[in-house]
Amino acid sequence: MQPVKGGKMTHSNITYFPSVRLAFDKVTRTLDNLITEAEKNNLPAVAEAYRQAFTLIRQGIEQIEHQGESTLHKHLENEMKEVLAIAHNNCTEIKTNIEDQFRESLEAVTTGIIRILQKKHLNDQYISNMKQEIETYALEEVTNIFSEEGIGFSGD
C-alpha cells in the first residue's frame, strides 16, 4: 500500500501489473550494468546516456501501469478481502492437513523403526535408550521425503 494525496492508502499498480515490471527486468538490469561499466571506465557521457534511457524506460513502465489500471480492481478493492478469505481459509486448511499428515508419517516411521529393531531381537531397554536417536532419524527421513515431494514443512 502506498500513501496518496489526502493520506489515503491505495495499492501500488505493481500489485496489479507485475508482468510489466518482469518483462522489463532484464532490460533494466542490463542498463544498470552498463551504467556501472561506463562509470568504471570513466565514460560519464555514456553513463548519462544509459541513465536517460533507464529513466525513459521507467517512465514508460509507469505509464503502461497507469493506463492499464482498469476500473475492475477499483470496484473490487474493498470487497476483495472477503473474496480472498476463501483462498486464505483453504491455505490454512491445507497447511493443517500437511501438518497432520507429517505427524502421522513421523509416528508411522518411528513405530516402523522400533518394529525393525524388535525383529532384530534388540531388547526393549536398548530400544528405549535409543528413543531420542530413533526419533531424530525418523524426523530426518520424513522431512527429506516431504522435501523431495516438494512439500515444505516448517513445523510452525
Image (cartoon, rainbow, N blue to C red):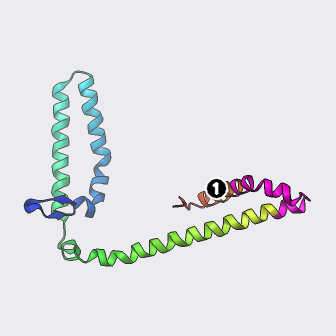
Q: Is residue 14 left or right of residue 111?
A: left
Q: Residue at x 28, y 75 (%)?
A: 80
Instruction: Name above or below for residue 134 compared with residue 99.
Output: above
Name the residue carrying label 1.
Answer: 144
Taking the magenta stretch, the answer to whether it contains residue 67 is no
**How many numbered marks have been drawn onto this rendered protein structure?**
1
Q: Residue at x 32, y 45 (%)?
A: 26
The kind of secondary structure element at disc 1 is helix
Which residue of the protein is positioned furthest toward the top in this rendering? 42
State the image coordinates of residue 79 (x, y, percent, origin top left).
Answer: 25, 78
Which residue of the protein is positioned furthest toward the left in this rendering? 6
Q: Residue at x 28, y 28 (%)?
A: 37
Rendered image quadrant of residue 15: bottom left
Taking the magenta stretch, the answer to whether it contains residue 119 is yes
The majority secondary structure of the magenta stretch comes to helix
Considering depth in this image, is 71 or 87 the residue closer to the camera? Answer: 87
Q: Is residue 85 left or right of residue 47?
A: right
Q: Quadrant of the N terminus?
A: bottom left
- Residue range in magenta is 115-136
State the image coordinates of residue 69 (x, y, percent, origin top left).
Answer: 19, 66
Q: Is residue 121 left or right of residue 132?
A: right
Q: Residue at x 66, y 60 (%)?
A: 142
Rendered image quadrant of residue 41: top left
State the image coordinates of residue 156 (x, y, percent, origin top left).
Answer: 51, 61
State the image coordinates of residue 39 (x, y, percent, origin top left).
Answer: 23, 26
